[in-house]
Image (cartoon, helix red, strand yellow):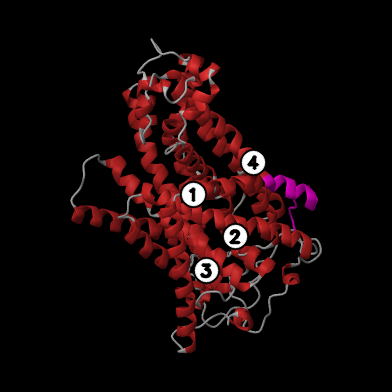
Amino acid sequence: MSPVPAVEARPEFRRRNPPGDDAVPSPDSAVPSPDSSPDSSSSASSRRTLGVTSLALLTYYAVSGGPFGIEPAVAAGGPLAAIACFAIMPLFWSVPEALITAELSSAYPEASGYVAWVEEAFGEKAGLVEGYLSWTSGVADNAVYPVLFLQYLTSEALPFGRKMAFLTAANAGLTYVSYRGLEVVGAVASLVAAMELLPFAIMCVVGAFQIDPERFFKSADDMACLSSDGCVSARATDDWSAWSRSIAWAPLMNNIFWNINYFDTASAFAGEVKDPGRTWPRAMFFAVLLVVLNYLLPLLVAIGATSSSRQDWQEGYLAAAAAHIGGPWLGAWTVFAAALSNLALYQAEMSANAFTLMGMAQRGLVPAAFARRSPYGTPTCALLASAGIIVVMSFFPFMEIVEVLNLLYCFALALEFAAFLQLRQTKPHVPRPYRIPLNTCGCVLMLLPANVLLVVMIGLASRTSHAICGSVLVAGVLLYRFQHYGRRRGWWTFRESGEDKAR
């Protein structure tokens, strides 16, 4: 993507299309900047590589990447609560988030994505806060996948030196794939999706004939029995207060929330999408559908076709369920699919995080070095910055930071929802190749359940998580002051498009 010309301001009408042109031009595609590579001056239209399938799969892997990781929801809430949450919560959370992403990404086709939305609505400082919260949450989450990949390969605890060597090499190799461009990442996602979803499709078909519907209605406490024989399931159906008391709400909600969010991550690819008015709504529809089915169908079959205890539902139980339903070969294939899924999740999220950081640089929010592209069109410095932090964070336990990531993401999403409503009111003239078919009042009602969920998630977070989140925000303030101190000292430069607002 060609950088923003040095003398160009950022009025909202700069994204307006010529009559009859339904491909929204990138806001930074006019004139190359001196600090860009020669390859970065190619036309925006020639760089638009993402269609419906590629965008849907990248979104799917940014959000889900497979049903792996849903097992703790059953352990926390029991079968009925887990099934109900995965069936209902996407309607009130994932669908509004995906619709907002489709509308605003088509209106603001920039790599900064949700950062652009918040900055256009509330100004530079709000945009910087949004970018920092989302990027921090995304990069920390990204660090999990090489660790999980290692756990799927071996159950033994490796010495620190070997573990460090593996994680560093894995991060380097996966970063190189991301460096080669979104076409390569999209192709990898398509290949992995086929290999990863097929064993679950087989498990669902074979297991459908083994389902015992009574297992769906057991409470979490009833699952302490290893089989349905001798268990008293009446508590789950007749005594709803006992059923409710058996649910560990905080772990259940954190797991569900973590598994169905991050649709807004796709906005980082907005400048790379072909025919945005057609591509965005279709890609979001298929992504939401794939995510919901990807969770719900294997969950129904694994619960209904196997006799399990509450303690069984730990990470990796789906592979054991697949082996029970289809045989050891299907269980082994599921383990292999889990490893592939973690690689694809890494690719999709790392690309999104890097493009977001690049977009912030294009808007003058972070140093211009992060806006430089490789010959493949990928943001080199942004990828390296993300990879460096990921390598360090790969050595931290994941479960200790999930709640913190969710909390950071809640604050970021609150800003995005507010920005969406603000832009509907203050900038209705900005062209929107796709527009949610609701007026402002309808959009407020659409977002009401999602905002209630945000409040619930913030309330469920522990004091420790709130303290860590506060520390992250303080670190962000210090980093903000440091980067502007470096600017005054001449250590780095910022894009001129943000010069008037950078101080």
Q: Closer to the observer: label 3 or label 2?
A: 3
* Residue ID for mark 1: 187
Q: What's under tag 3, amino acid-wise?
A: Met
Question: Residue 28's spot in the image, x, y percent?
Answer: 63, 72
| Residue at image mark 4 | 92
Give me the residue at 51% from left, 74% from top. Answer: 366
Going from the N terminus, do you reach mark 3 or mark 4 first?
4
Query: In the depicted view, which residue is nearer to us: 365 or 154?
Result: 365
Q: Earlier in the sequence, mark 1 or mark 2?
A: 1
Q: Nearer the viewer, residue 326 or 50?
A: 326
Mark 1 / mark 4, whichever is N-terminal: 4
Q: Secondary structure at mark 1?
A: helix
Instruction: Calculate the distance from the C-alpha at mark 1 to the C-alpha at mark 2.
Output: 15 Å
Q: Position of residue 498 (x, y in %)?
A: 61, 79
Q: Amino acid at mark 2?
A: Glu
Residue 328 location in percent, x, y?
A: 31, 24
Q: Are marks 1 and 3 in contact (CB under 8 Å)?
A: no
Report the residue at 24% width, 56% height from top.
164
- Residue placed furthest toward the bottom: 489
Mark 1 vs mark 3, CA separation in Å = 22 Å
Q: Residue at 36%, 21% (x, y): give it.
A: 324
Instruction: Give the residue at mark 2.
Output: 272
Q: Which residue is mark 3?
A: 358
Give the magenta range: 432-448
Furthest toward the top, the residue is 230
